[in-house]
Image (cartoon, helix red, strand yellow):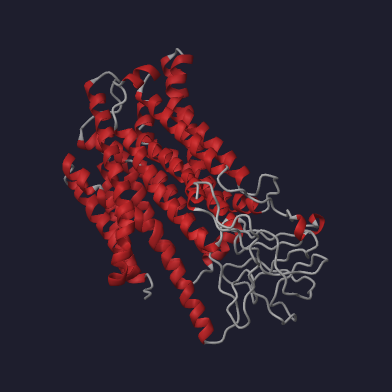
Amino acid sequence: MTLLSEDQSARPQPCRLPEPGRHISSSLHYSTDYGGSKEDYMDSGETPVFGAVEPPRRSRGRLILHGLVMFGREFCYAVEAAFVTPVLLSVGLPRSLYSLVWLISPILGFLLQPIIGSASDYCRSSWGRRRPYILTLGILMLLGITLFLNGDAVISAIVSDRSLRSIWAIVVVMFGVVLFDFAADFIDGPIKAYLFDVCSHQDKERGLHYHALLTGLGGACGYLVGAMDWGHSALGQLLGSEYQVIYFFSALTWGIFLSVHLFSIPEQPLGKVTPSDSSAPSALRLLGSHSNGYGALPKEPVSPVVTASVPDLRPRSFSALGEANSVTSSAKQPNKEAQKTMTFRSLMKAMFNMPSHYRYLCISHLLGWTAFLCNMLFFTDFMGQIVYKGNPYADHNSTAYITYERGVEVGCWGLCINAVSSALYSYVQRFLLPYIGLKGLYFMGYFMFGMGTSLIGLFPNILATLILCSVFGVMSSTLYTIPFNLIAEYQRVEEEQGKLHGRSEPPRGTGVDCAALTCMVQLAQIIVGAGLGALVNMAGSVIVVVLSASTTSLLGCLFIALFIRYVE
């Protein structure tokens, strides 16, 4: 089998219908009771159908090529995390304002994520639903990192006045950081939805595994490139400075892997029907029954229809915000199409109405990400100023500034250790799970991070700091895996309890749950961006960064122990 070969790609896959008496998922659930308001319908004017066409199996090579975009994205993310604060300080941004650059992107994401997530569900481009969004956001990422790493050099070459040059350099670099951060945050959703749209259930799990593996490798390589001294190398002298060398590697990596990703697996456009299926009935999507509960959209009664058990030929929605929250009529009749999509208002309503154990999970996730971002976003600056005692505001040819740059480079080595330990701990979690459970792993991740950052803040030694960087990876792996595993377990328990008590309502979809956790990440960025700069200004030292991370993480430990629901 060659790298690009596909298993069973040439053979049409049979439509899989639920067997009598078996549990039916929420996207396929329906009831024969058409009275009252217990069901939502969309009358397409044609015979409605249920089910879904199973995508063909994908080869390992295809899934790896699809996941390479995560390597490139995390590579560029690592470069941004390592150099954004040093670059902003080097162009003259006041220390009291340098955390504000993280405010704009998460605020935009918090407001626009539901809209963009739903928009990709209904994109009718001939190239597919997801790839146009991925390409657009990928180009914005490239533009952002271009302005971020080259803005100072470009402005210095254009503007001669020193004071005016400093102002324009700050504006251009900040705009590049915000643009890159916005695009990099948003592109993850369409990438995951693209994977879900074109893969079978088994391949989704394999694909996500490759995504996680390549994400860790990309972060490690990005930090490794940042840790090298390119300024005195032949490539650094050729391109002008170390920032231009790092930009060269970042742009090359991202451009190649984004292109490979976009052509890795063909994507079928929304509403496209193959010739052999042209006589098939149109598609109908139903939402679960009963009143407007958590995870449901406002319901409007519409005319009931008679159902038939025929496969649904319309591609399903797998957007994190649209998976369980969209209703569409026949794709053949756009003039009659009505959609119920997740909006910011409905997302907030669903989050406030969620069961208490889901709400507690969101709060603990918020505390964890606040602690993690406090440390990660400013760690290289901490290394340069506190551990190495350099000065980012000194002249660029001074000893103090060169010492600061050396601290930033060593900080990149520490973040590289973090990426490697994250990948290793993700593997170790499988062996620890039977002994301490999900809640124990959750508590342990927060506790190790809190103790590690407190030791770094109290004893800022070079060797000890690099060794303790391994606890950053433990926290990273915990935040990316345990909360989502807990959501899956909560829903499994709810399904089992529903079957035990004979309840017929479908299980709640995971879309709103995942969206709520994602919003906690963006809210943590807002908190860090709004508050950390003021704390640093009040304390007069960036040592408050790691101490704040430690305190917040240990508070998260206490919250997990008291409020997070235990599951077997």
In this view, the residue in front, 80 or 161, is 80
Residue at 34% of width from left, 66% of height from top? Answer: 560
For the C terminus, the quadrant is bottom left
Q: Is residue 101 left or right of residue 6?
A: left
**Residue at x-position 25% and y-position 57%:** 448
Above or below — where is 29 with respect to 407?
A: below
- Please state if 555 lies on the left or on the right of 212 as rendered: left
Using the image, determine if residue 156 lies above or below residue 386. Answer: above
Say which quarter of the image contains residue 479: bottom left
Pick the front one: 109 or 416: 416
Q: Position of residue 406 (x, y in %)?
A: 25, 30
Residue sitting at x 62%, y 59%: 317
Q: Return the x and y of residue 375 as percentages of the image width and height.
A: 31, 46
User: Front-most of 27 and 354?
Assistant: 27
Residue placed farthest to the front in the image? 1
Looking at this rendering, what residue extends furthest in the top direction? 160
Residue at x-position 51% and y-position 37%: 141
Residue 396's image quarter? top left
Total of numbered circles in the picture? 0
Q: Is residue 540 visible?
A: no
Q: x and y percent of residue 233 in the render?
A: 30, 21
- Residue lying at the far bottom of the rendered structure: 501
Q: Relative to residue 219, is residue 56 drawn left or right? A: right
Q: Is residue 414 above or below residue 502?
A: above
**Image coords of residue 428 (percent x, y):** 29, 60
Residue 446 in sight here:
yes
